[in-house]
């Protein structure tokens, strides 16, 4: 992967992560989106919830990075695979 920017995997992973969040929020109405945004504010979270959320975000980020790496490898090998959302 010498021909790839070191930040490429992170950029693709970030896009996958953002897309997965958008997909989750898509089915919510405005009131539910507001509740979700308030629930994610750290000032309203218990320490246990914050810890579980941090762990979940880390796991999703690792999954996104591994998918991005596979996608980049496929591009370098000339594959025409499409990257799938998380």
Image (tube, rainbow, N blue to C red):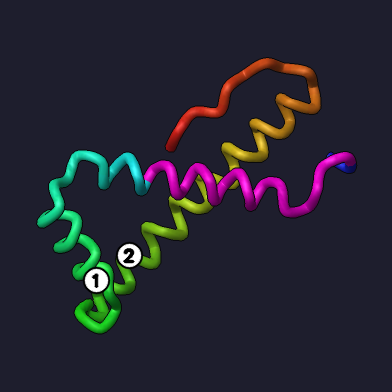
x 20%, y 70%: residue: 38
Q: Position of residue 49 (x, y in %)?
A: 24, 71
x 20%, y 60%: residue: 36
Question: Magenta span covers which residues?
Answer: 3-20
32 vs 27: above or below: below
Left or right: 24 with respect to 73?
left
Q: Nearer the viewer, residue 47 or 38?
A: 38
Please rate how many residues cluster around mark 1, counting C-alpha atoms within 10 Å: few if below 14, some from 14 to 19, many from 20: some
Q: Which residue is mark 1?
A: 49
x 82%, y 42%: residue: 4
Q: Report which quarter residue 68 is drawn in.
A: top right
Q: Nearer the viewer, residue 32 or 69?
A: 32
Does dot 2 land on a helix, a strand or a loop?
helix
Q: Please, which residue is most extreme toward the left here? A: 31
Q: Which residue is mark 2?
A: 53
Q: Report which quarter residue 55 is drawn in.
A: bottom left
Q: Position of residue 80 (x, y in %)?
A: 67, 16
Q: What number is the disc on residue 71?
A: none
């Amino acid at each position: 992967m010498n021909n790839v920017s070191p930040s490429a995997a992170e950029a693709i992973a970030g896009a996958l992560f953002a897309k997965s969040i958008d997909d989750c929020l898509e089915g919510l109405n405005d009131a539910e989106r507001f509740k979700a945004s308030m629930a994610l504010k750290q000032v309203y979270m218990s320490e246990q919830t914050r810890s579980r959320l941090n762990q979940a975000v880390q796991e999703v980020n690792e999954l996104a990075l591994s998918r991005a790496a596979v996608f980049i490898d496929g591009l370098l090998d000339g594959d025409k695979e499409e990257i799938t959302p998380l």
